[in-house]
Image: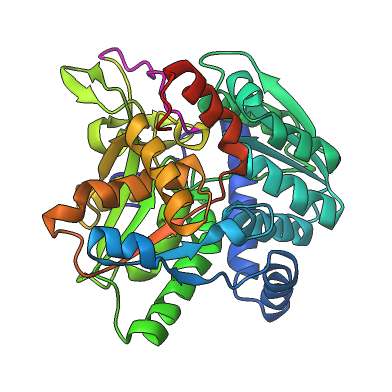
Amino acid sequence: MQKPTYGRFGGQFVPEVLMPALNELEEEYERYKEAPEFLRELNYYLTEFAGRSTPLYHARNLSKKYGTKIYLKREDLVHGGAHKLNNTIGQALLAKYMGKKRLIAETGAGQHGTATAMAGANMGFETVVYMGAKDVERQRMNVYRMELMGTKVHPVRSGSMTLKDAINEALRDWVTNVENTHYLIGSVVGPHPYPMIVRDFQSVIGTEVKQQIMEKEGRLPDSIVACAGGGSNAMGIFHPFVEDTDVKLLPVEAGGCGMQVQGKTAMHSASLGAGEEGILQGARTLILQDKYGQILESTSVSAGLDYSGVGPELAHLAETGRIQPGSVNDQEALDAFHELCRLEGIIPALESSHALAYIKKMADTGELGDLVVVSLSGRGDKDLETVLKVKATAGDEKL
């Protein structure tokens, strides 16, 4: 087991049979990540296939309402509707260079699975996606999108039937088929080197923001706000700003309705805010667990934030004080979802709606500063059925 890579967090807590695969992945990534041929091909796919760069949009009506200048980093405009394609293109291309023939992945909201299906179809891989049965039900359109592109979707009916269980099943597949298969992890989670690889491929978000905000405003933002489940979009936009200590980095977790974790109120999926140190999916990080070390089931209206842990680098940044975690509950996220639709004509993903809700929550405190960038990590088409179900259940016409 390799020593942790982010303070006391990270590492490789996996079966011995996977160590050669992880070592191979790290060696091949180090070999290709700065190779001119690899970078040219990666840039081609990001530009011509994914549609980068994405706009940094001044949300004038939202800014006026909350009294601070708000920019939205429009990752919802990436092909497929979310930031996830940045990483799947990068890892699929790496797998191609490594000579792998098969991709497997896990997915929660379905966005990572869809992005894996897109990259797999485009590059000629056999592709299999594991998805919690609960998420299959609430994200049926994304399941169909994956199937349209030739991907086999496996519903996972064990445990809580959500993202963590899908990851467990994907790991079992990888152990069995490690010779010809690349496990394309979708967030900054799992054993080293995955958190580093996913962060690097997603850092295109923050790199673009840094250039765009300087062109538009002549300075860096006061705050950057991003939703955080596993944390790929958060680390993607935060990483290029980690050394810019005057910029507040604010990850926003799913608050749900609140529950008790070892005498503290845990915000349903808020591992940064209420988690304890533990091992989850091959890494030491902050997780929601009971006093016996058993993983607690997370709950969120947003499938993509419904995860009992968080990436180890985010855990380290929280412990050192570089990021300041917050949370919002389901209703606050739903209110922000509708507000962006009405004020800006943009339908955000429920994941992104948590970041938007945090701005609404903090606007009057002055803590965000005068210039704020929000990562709009995905579009909300996939969530319309969920929102309609909540509306029907609540009987609330204001929704």
Indicate the quadrant containing the N terminus: top left, top right, bottom left or bottom right.
top left
Q: Position of residue 140 (x, y in %)?
A: 69, 29
Vertical arrangement, residue 371 with respect to residue 308, above or below: below
Q: Position of residue 293 (x, y in %)?
A: 32, 17
Vertical arrangement, residue 297 with respect to residue 178, above or below: above
In the displayed structure image, the side of residue 339 where residue 49 appears, left or right: right
Front residue of 145 and 188:
145
Vertical arrangement, residue 86 with respect to residue 130, above or below: below
Q: Is residue 322 magenta?
A: no
Indicate the quadrant containing the C terminus: top left, top right, bottom left or bottom right.
top left
Front residue of 19 and 230:
230
Front residue of 194 and 65:
65
Can see residue 3? no
- Residue at the (28%, 32%) spot, across then down: 277
The secondary structure that dominates the magenta segment is: loop
Q: Is residue 301 magenta?
A: yes
Q: Quadrant of residue 246?
A: bottom left
Bounds of the magenta segment: 291-302
How many numbered circles are shown?
0
Can see residue 314? yes
Outermost residue, left side: 365
- Residue at the (54%, 60%) spot, across then down: 75
Q: Position of residue 265 (x, y in %)?
A: 20, 23
Q: Position of residue 361 (x, y in %)?
A: 23, 46
- Residue at the (30%, 45%) spot, across then down: 315
